[in-house]
Image (cartoon, grey):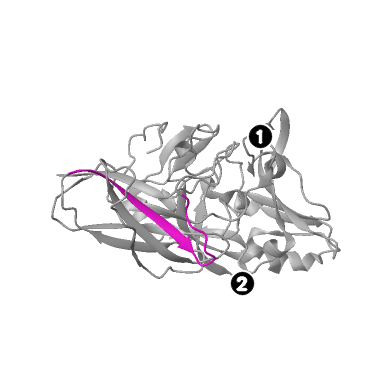
């Protein structure tokens, strides 16, 4: 569990997001909800920088301009009249797992639950963008949210860019629905961007603008925030595709298991840019054997994901034969051969944390 979680208020349930900060509101997905193939909208983690802007469907418009021949805009009703696509998409905050890094970088102290698999429905952005006649010199689209605030002493809107090819991919959506219902304010209503396979910073909420540009965008949230910075401050590469990762949903941390009784170790795994997970391995290491020399990795059984951007369920049977404390480990490998590392590569902002998943349990 994230070490600085604020207790949930009265009326919260095991399926309510667990508050991390209240102003602005940020919350992580509860453990119970992570066992579902699709995370219910009411349980999905929330990431907010400046607070929820005051937008209504009736007053919403999306402006498309910049390096285009025919700047244009459209309203919510017109957007709903266009062909829709529905996709199950892993949504993961770039800072998910930051609290596991040593030393811990600054930023929200996320544990491992700033993630979920949402069922989004919306209109492919390219159907709208192509109306504007994109200039051949355009290299990116900059997407603007209605939210704004002060960062490093400067007033700025939340803006993030995508390469033209990614912005115009048929699965990059102007999303209007989540889990079969209209988006709620905390999830970006009336319309948000959804870019499958990328960290959720790309999924600009409360979307109101998209401008084509002929030079790479260098805004605050593109070149200063949400970038990988090494210990020497030399690299400033923007976070992009999800790193291969797994999550253990059972057993739970410090759960008591019975010696000689079979336990089903299970969880989910995912990777970025539509690359499928091909393998998940599990091993169980006794506390008195920290190097795990006698604990071999065993292949887990994989469940077919609900779509190319959804996570893959996995399970592995384990019968502990001796009492004591154990560490249960899981690591995923994707179709490109990327494997979860033993330790996440450290960076100064705590992004892309994807070490081998682990849970400590007790066998009695």
Mark toward the viewer: 1 or 2: 1
Residue under label 2:
83
> Does the magenta run of residues contain 302?
no
Residue under label 1:
232
Q: Residue at x 59, y 56 (%)?
A: 241
What is the x, y in percent for residue 123?
A: 62, 66
Residue 112 in sight from this viewpoint:
yes
Q: Which quarter of the figure has residue 63?
A: bottom right
Q: Residue at x 41, y 60 (%)?
A: 38
Region of the chain picked out in magenta, as a range: 324-341
What is the x, y in percent for residue 286?
A: 25, 45
Disc 1 and disc 2: Cα gap in Å?
48 Å
Q: Is residue 148 left or right of residue 255?
A: right
Q: Which quarter of the figure has residue 129?
A: bottom right
> Does the magenta run of residues contain 329?
yes
Which quarter of the figure is the N terminus placed in?
top left
Q: Which quarter of the figure has residue 18?
A: top left
- Which secondary structure lies at badge 2? loop
**Disc 2 residue crowd, few under 14, some 14–19, many 20+, Cα 10 Å:** few
């Amino acid at each position: 569990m994230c070490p600085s979680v604020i207790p949930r208020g009265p009326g919260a349930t095991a399926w309510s997001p667990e508050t991390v900060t209240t102003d602005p509101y940020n919350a992580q997905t509860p453990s119970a909800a992570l066992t579902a193939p699709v995370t219910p909208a009411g349980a999905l983690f929330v990431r907010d920088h400046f607070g929820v802007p005051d937008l209504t469907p009736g007053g919403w418009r999306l402006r498309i301009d910049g390096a285009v021949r025919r700047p244009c805009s459209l309203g919510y009703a017109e957007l709903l009249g266009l062909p829709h696509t529905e996709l199950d998409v892993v949504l993961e905050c770039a800072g998910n797992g930051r609290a596991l890094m040593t030393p811990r970088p600054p930023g929200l102290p996320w544990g491992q639950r700033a993630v979920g698999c949402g069922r989004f429905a919306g209109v492919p952005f390219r159907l709208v963008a192509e109306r504007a006649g994109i200039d051949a010199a355009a290299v990116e689209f900059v997407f603007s949210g209605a939210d704004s605030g002060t960062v490093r002493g400067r007033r700025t809107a939340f803006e993030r860019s995508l390469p033209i090819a990614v912005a115009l991919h048929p699965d990059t959506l102007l999303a209007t629905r989540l889990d079969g219902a209209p988006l709620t304010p905390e999830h970006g209503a009336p319309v948000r961007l959804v870019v499958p396979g990328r960290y959720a910073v790309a999924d600009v909420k409360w979307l109101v603008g998209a401008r084509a540009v002929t030079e790479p965008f260098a805004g605050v949230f593109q070149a200063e925030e949400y970038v990988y910075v090494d210990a020497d401050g030399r690299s400033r590469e923007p976070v992009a595709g999800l790193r291969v990762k797994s999550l253990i949903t059972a057993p739970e941390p410090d759960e008591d298991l019975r010696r000689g009784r079979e336990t089903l170790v299970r969880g989910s795994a995912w990777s970025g840019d539509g690359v499928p997970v091909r393998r998940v391995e599990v091993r169980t290491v006794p506390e008195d054997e920290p190097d795990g020399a006698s604990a071999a990795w065993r292949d887990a059984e994989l469940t077919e994901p609900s779509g190319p951007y959804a996570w893959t369920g996995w399970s592995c049977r384990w019968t502990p034969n001796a009492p004591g404390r154990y560490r249960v480990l899981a690591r995923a490998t994707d179709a490109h051969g990327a494997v979860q590392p033993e330790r996440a590569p450290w960076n100064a902002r705590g992004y892309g944390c994807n070490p081998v998943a682990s849970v400590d349990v007790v066998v009695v």
